[in-house]
Image (cartoon, grey):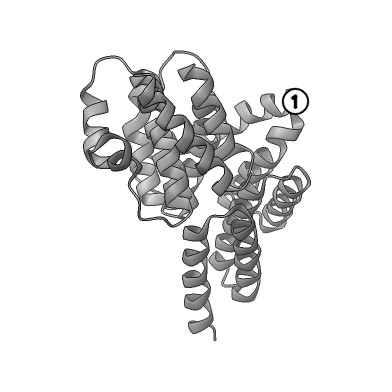
Amino acid sequence: MAYNLHMYAGVAVWECGDRLTKAEEIMRIHAKRMIQYNHDNGLRNILPLLQLALKLMGSAEDAFMTFCGISEDDFFQQEWHRKGGKTSKLIGHTTRLYLAIMRGDMALAERIYEMGKMYHKGGILFIGSIMRAFLGGLVAFATARYHGDNEKEMIRVAEESISTIKIWAKHSYWNFANKLFLLEAEYWFLNGNEKLARRKFGDSIAAAAKHRFKNEEGLAAQRAAIFHLHYNRKQEASSYLKHAKDCYEQWGATGLVEQIDAAMSEILEGRD
C-alpha cells in the first residue's frame, strides 16, 4: 500500500503536470487514512510530497505539523537518523531537490544533490530515482557552467544523465522526450553552441506541451529564459518567463507564479 501510494503521489505532483489542487486534495485524504490505519511508513512516504505540493501552490501550511505535530525540519532530522525507511528518505530528498530547481536556486539544489548521494545507492528504481537522474543532470550542467572545484565530476554526472534519459526515451518517448531535449539544451548551453541550445530548448518546450506536462513545459521555458539572460537578450528572456508563468498558473503553482513575476520585474527594471 505504501509503495503504491507514493508512486501515485509522485507521479501526480512532479510527473503528470495535473492540477496541484487536485493532487493536494487526494494526498490529504490518503494522509488521514494512513493515520486511521496506523500505517506509519505510508504517512512518512506521502507527507513530503504533500508538503511539496503546498509549497508549489504558495501555501504557508506545514503538512508535517498538520499530520504529525512537528515541523518539516524536525521531521527530516528524525528521518535522517531513523534506521531503515530508505524510501521515505529518498522521497524527502528528491522533493527538496525538485523544489530548489523549480525555484531556480541551483546553488541550494547542488547542496541537496550532494547530501542525497548516500540514499540513492542501489535499491529499487522508483519514481524519485527516475526524477533524480533528470534533476541531477540539470544541477550538474548549471554547476559545471560556473567552473567550480568539481567541474569535471559535474560534467560526468551531466553526461551520464543524458545517456540514461536517452535510453528511457527509446522505451517511452512520450514520458522522456522533453526531459532529454532539455538536458541536451543545457549541454549545448554549457559548450557555447547557442544555435543548438536554442533549438533544443524549443524542442523541450514543444514536447512537454504536446504531451501535456505543464510543469515541465514551464521548467523548460524558465531554463530557456536563463539561457537568453546569459547572452543579455532580455526581451527574449522576458517572453520565456511569461511562458513559464502561464504554465505554472495552469498547473496551480501560485508560489512559482509569484517568483516569476518578481524575476520579470527585475529584468524590466534593468532593461537598457
Q: Quadrant of the C terminus?
A: bottom right
Above or below, 171 against 183 in this view is above
Residue that numbered label 1 is attached to: 170
Q: Nearer the viewer, residue 254 or 161?
A: 254
| Residue 64 location, quadrant | top left
Q: Is residue 249 left or right of residue 176?
A: left
- Mark 1 surroundings within 10 Å by alpha-carbon count, few (fewer than 14), some (14 through 19), many (20 or more): few
Residue 144 in sight from this viewpoint: no
Location of residue 198 in the rendering, given as x and y in whole percent from the top left corner: 70, 57
Q: Is residue 50 left or right of residue 160?
A: left
- Residue at 49% x, 51% y is 102
Above or below, 105 against 125 in this view is below
Location of residue 48 in the rendering, given as x and y in whole percent from the top left corner: 39, 36
Q: Residue furthest bottom?
A: 272
Q: Nearer the viewer, residue 225 or 143?
A: 225
- Residue at 54% x, 65% y is 230
Residue 128 in sight from this viewpoint: yes
Location of residue 179 in the rendering, given as x and y in whole percent from the top left corner: 64, 40
- Residue at 31% x, 33% y is 115
